[in-house]
Amino acid sequence: MTDRAIKRRQLILEGNLWKAILVLAVPAALNDFIRAAYNLIDTFFVASIGSMEVAAITFVGPLNMFVRTMSVGLAIAATNLIAREIGRSDYKKGKSAALQILVIALAIGGVTGVLGWVYSKEILLAASATEGIFDVANLYFRITVLSSPFIFINSVYVAVKRAEGDTLKSMVVNTIGMMIKIIMTYIFIYQMDMGISGLAYSTIIGTFLVSLYAMYDMFIVPGVLKLSLKDLQFSWSFIWTLLIIAVPVMLEKSSISFSFIVLNKYVIGYGEKVLAGYGIANRNNSMFFATVTGFASGLSPLISQNLGAGNSVRAKAAINKTFIMALAIAIAIVSVVLPFRSHIAGVFAKGDAEVLYHTVNAMGVYSITVIPWAIFQVANGVFQGTGHTKYNLIISIMRIYLFRLPIVILLSKYSSYEEYSIWYAMLYSNILTGIFAYILYLYHRKDLRLSGEALVAAVE
């Protein structure tokens, strides 16, 4: 094991907890922020083409997110399963876990890309794409879905690094990938006049180059979890444990994506300009929300390693401190975003007064929910870290199918709020989700245990 890896493990298991949380959470937060910025960069460049194009990529966003939910589920499971083995100093099992998950990810990513390409029109029609945005949305979706295999590789890479406690490297790599995307998007749109297709191709190039480095780093660069295909041995007990952790996350993320697809139907009913404003507001909010989401991502391996080492007291202390940090960051974000929302929205509205109006109104109503979102995400990190992801699935189902969609339907049909029905539904659902997530965490905090221990022990 390298000196750097030893120091990271010692910090996680024995060092100052405030420092450990910051070392893990800040790069993870920046990494999530950068991933959210990918979508915001799309919006910025597309806004210069036209508001219908902004509406089109807003409509496609949940579809792309739905397609890629399996990579998120695999990544969260990978972080948990690898980190607990590192906590036990069993690096052979950690490598075995990483290899198996990577192969599975590549297979699923490849199938997803092919199916998305072949059935893109049918998918968009099923999602109720309007005639005004259909052709642009189909072109954009059909190209971007081809990046699925690279996204799966990148997700596993980020998971491996987070499990090791090295959240900085994946953040740096993704930052470079984003810069490449910005450069290529500028060239394709402004120099080569490729329009929306240029935006899609830049996404493929950026994700491909990141995945290329990820494979190099995992298989070539010396490290505590340097992978080799000769060590690949599938274990059905491990795969079953992986599914126990990953499937609830996949269902959780899929339900969220599906809810946004359903929500798009209601938003677009108020007009494409409302959908464009909604998309700009959401993509800006995604960056703010990603900042606190990163604290949950950093907390997860900290819990897994400490529980793997049998230190539940330290894991609980880490949770309490992460709550404090995430809430402080969320309050700071709100204090900046709300007063300057008009200026932020103006950057993306590109002089379209109607789009600007709807964007500012949306941000004014529900950007404040980054505070309950922080509570929700830390609770999310606890359940990810212990591997009890079924609770995250329960929270998301409540958020979407009890707290959000019913409110949207009721306000849309029985009130005169018009598009404000959407904004208020987002506000109420996020607040109620934060409260419910914290109550669920309080109920389970006394007994923090790793999920599937008996099966994980069978991994060879």
Image: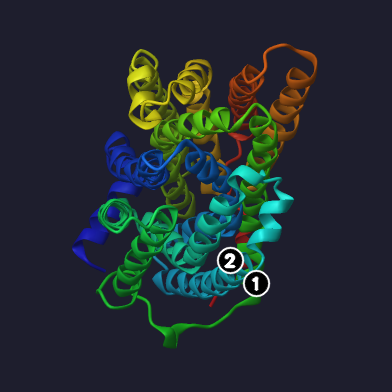
Look at the numbered disc 1 and give the secondary structure of its residue: helix
Image location (x, y in percent) of residue 50: 44, 39
* Residue situated in front as seen by the camera: 113 or 161: 113
Residue topped by disc 2:
456
Q: Is residue 99 left or right of residue 30?
A: right
Q: Are marks 2 and 1 in contact (CB under 8 Å)?
A: yes
Q: Quadrant of the N terminus?
A: bottom left
Q: Residue at x 32, y 20 (%)?
A: 343
Mark 2 or mark 1, earlier in chain:
1
Q: Is residue 353 left or right of residue 409?
A: left
* Residue situated in front as seen by the camera: 203 or 427: 203
User: How is the rendered protein coloured?
Assistant: rainbow
Residue topped by disc 1:
237
Picture disc at residue 453: none
Image location (x, y in percent) of residue 79: 47, 57
Image location (x, y in percent) of residue 11: 28, 47
Q: Residue at x 52, y 76 (%)?
A: 103
Q: Is residue 322 left or right of residue 129?
A: left
Q: Residue at x 40, y 15 (%)?
A: 338
